[in-house]
Image (spheres, rainbow, N blue to C red):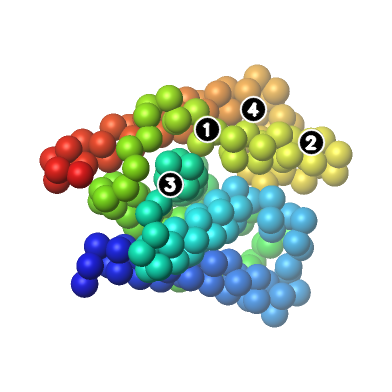
């Protein structure tokens, strides 16, 4: 198989898996009368899975149609990769299998889609970005653009939480960690995200140099 066919097919399958996992969760929650759209779509893990899934489908389709990836799309793909790594790390370090809302007490999330979104997805999206060496070489100055998506999400979550007291994660709730605590977590995730972006760009460019691309 050619490079474009291999990576194009891989991205389509991974994109379908991520978006399919979201649909699976929604269907299961509807079946259990627990689907609360405004709350569900506030979770960064869900938004990131949708973001990455759509980007993978678009970039995969372009490759299968033998079209070259643009620098802009590559940077967007970098942003999706960083978002997926952040939710994977955040889930396994801070959240685990705990319920996101007291209203879900006793409810068990479907195991496979949860694993795809929080474990397999972040790993596979990262490998795809690092090893898809035949493409543009964004400069390191492009890394800050990957913060646009998470900062919009953080701003929305804080405004919404201030209005209806619904918080997607405990570390954004000032009643639990204090205003200073929220600020520290946001700064920490921002630094972590930026560091990831620079690291991924450097590693990918190193891979391109090693492979002669």
Neighbor class of circle 4 (other Cα within 10 Å; few <14, some 14-19, many 20+) is: some
- Mark 2 sits on what residue? 159
Which circle, 2 or 3, is nearer the viewer?
A: 3
Which circle, 1 or 3, is nearer the viewer?
A: 3
Between the residue at mark 1 and the residue at mark 4, the CA separation in whole angstroms equals 22 Å
Q: Which sits earlier in the primary sequence, circle 1 or circle 4? A: 1
Q: Which sits earlier in the primary sequence, circle 1 or circle 3? A: 3
Residue 19 percent location from the top left of the image: 54, 67
Quadrant in which the C terminus appears: top left
- Mark 1 sits on what residue? 145
Q: Which sits earlier in the primary sequence, circle 2 or circle 4? A: 2
Query: Is residue 168 visible in the rendered structure shown here?
Result: yes
Residue under the point 43% across and 25% down: 141
Tags 2 and 3 touching, CB below 8 Å: no
- Mark 3 sits on what residue? 70
Is residue 88 or residue 111 the one in the foreground? 88
Residue under the point 43% across and 47% down: 70
């Amino acid at each position: 198989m050619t490079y474009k066919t291999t990576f194009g097919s891989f991205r389509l399958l991974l994109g379908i898996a991520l978006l399919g996992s979201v649909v699976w969760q929604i269907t299961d929650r509807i079946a259990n009368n627990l689907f609360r759209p405004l709350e569900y779509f506030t979770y960064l893990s869900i938004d990131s899975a949708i973001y990455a899934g759509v980007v993978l489908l678009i970039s995969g389709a372009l490759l299968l149609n033998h079209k070259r990836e643009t620098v802009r799309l590559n940077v967007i793909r970098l942003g999706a990769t960083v978002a997926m790594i952040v939710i994977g790390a955040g889930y396994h370090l801070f959240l685990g299998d705990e319920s996101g809302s007291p209203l879900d007490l006793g409810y068990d999330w479907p195991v496979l889609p949860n694993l795809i979104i929080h474990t397999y997805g972040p790993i596979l999206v990262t490998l795809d970005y690092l090893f898809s060496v035949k493409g543009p070489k964004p400069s390191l100055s492009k890394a800050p653009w990957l913060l646009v998506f998470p900062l919009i999400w953080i701003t929305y979550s804080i405004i919404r939480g201030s209005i209806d007291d619904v918080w997607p994660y405990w570390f954004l709730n000032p009643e639990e960690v204090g205003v200073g605590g929220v600020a520290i977590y946001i700064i920490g995730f921002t630094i972590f995200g930026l560091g990831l972006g620079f690291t991924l760009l450097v590693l990918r460019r190193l891979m391109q140099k090693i492979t002669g691309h």
